[in-house]
Image: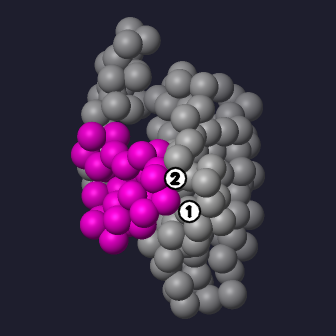
Amino acid sequence: MPYLIDGHNLIPKLGLRLDFIDDEKELMTLLQEFCRRRRTQVEVYFDGAPAGQATRYKLGRVTAYFINKASSADAAIESRLNRLGKAAKNWTVVSSDNRIQRAAGAVHARVIASEDFSRKMRKARSLNGENPDDDPKLSTSEVDEWMKLFEKQGK
């Protein structure tokens, strides 16, 4: 089952810091690993892209949307749920935000709180014999892909 994720809502639940410059990048790396292990896909939404610079990045099974300051990740998630229509019931929305949870319930999408999803992510890593507190291991090609992605974003 694919996931729609409220990125900035999930970041602190994973022990990452919202004030860290690469918090979104770290979350995307963890989500990439989760998707690979669980054979699923994720759409993650982040607030705060500079005006006129809302962007979409796809890397493997993770698609990240950086929503410009004129809107919000919450509004983008709600819009995506509405566009999914009846297919929304096949998605799981990850957020502890009541507004997002209500919107997901209205279209019959599954809802999981960010705290619960963070535990699910840790469990997926530990089931594969890894310590969930270790840094994820990326191949050289994956690191190169991420570097290209974030070099583009910075320009």
Q: Position of residue 70 (x, y in %)?
A: 55, 90
Q: Is residue 110 above or below residue 74?
A: above
Residue drawn at point x = 61 percent, y = 39 percent: 41
Q: Position of residue 130 (x, y in %)?
A: 38, 15
Residue drawn at point x = 66 percent, y = 39 percent: 61
Q: Is the N terminus in the top left, top right, bottom left or bottom right quadrant?
A: top right
Residue drawn at point x = 35 percent, y = 65 percent: 102
Say which amino acid is labelled 1: Leu
Q: Upstream in the sequence, badge 1 or badge 2?
A: 2
* Magenta stretch holds residue 126: no
Q: Position of residue 48 (x, y in %)?
A: 50, 78
CA gap, disc 1 and disc 2: 9 Å
Q: Disc 2 marks which residue?
A: 4
Q: Which residues are magenta?
A: 92-117
User: Foreground mark, 1 or 2?
Assistant: 1
Q: Position of residue 3 (x, y in %)?
A: 52, 45
